[in-house]
Image (cartoon, rainbow, N blue to C red):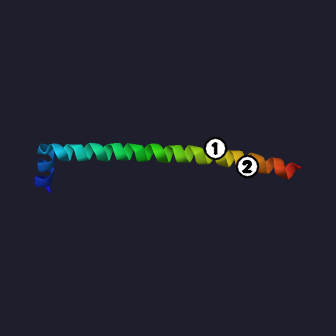
C-alpha cells in the first residue's frame, strides 16, 4: 500500500486523477445542496397552495 501511495506522489497523472476526484466531489456536494434547497422551496410552495385550497 505504501508503494502505491509513493508511486502516485511521484506520478503526475496520479496527481491529476486526485484533482479530478476532488473536483467531482465538490460538484456532487454542490448539486446535493442545491437539490435540497430547491426541494425545500418547492415543499413550502406546495404547502402554501394546499393551505389556500383547503380554506376555499
Q: Position of residue 27 (x, y in %)?
A: 41, 44
- 9 with respect to 53 (left or right): left
Residue 21: mark in rendering: none
- Is tag 2's residue or tag 1's residue first in the polypeptide sequence? 1
Give the SS element for disc 2. helix
Give the SS element for disc 1. helix
Circle 1 Cα neighbour tier, 10 Å, few/some/many (<14 / 14–19 / ≥20): few
Residue nearest the observer in this picture, 27 or 51: 27
State the residue lying farthest toward the right.
Answer: 56
Q: Position of residue 16 (x, y in %)?
A: 23, 43
Q: Position of residue 49 (x, y in %)?
A: 77, 47
User: Which residue is disc 2 drawn over?
Assistant: 47
User: Which residue is disc 1 drawn over?
Assistant: 41
Alpha carbon separation for disc pair 2 and 1: 10 Å
Please tell me which residue is depicted at 27% across the width and 42% down the height of the picture.
Answer: 19
Please tell me which residue is depicted at 30% across the width and 47% down the height of the picture.
Answer: 21
Amino acid at each position: 500500500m505504501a508503494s502505491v501511495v509513493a508511486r502516485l506522489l511521484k506520478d503526475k497523472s496520479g496527481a491529476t486523477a486526485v484533482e479530478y476526484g476532488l473536483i467531482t466531489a465538490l460538484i456532487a456536494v454542490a448539486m446535493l445542496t442545491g437539490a435540497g434547497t430547491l426541494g425545500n422551496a418547492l415543499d413550502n410552495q406546495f404547502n402554501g397552495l394546499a393551505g389556500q385550497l383547503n380554506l376555499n
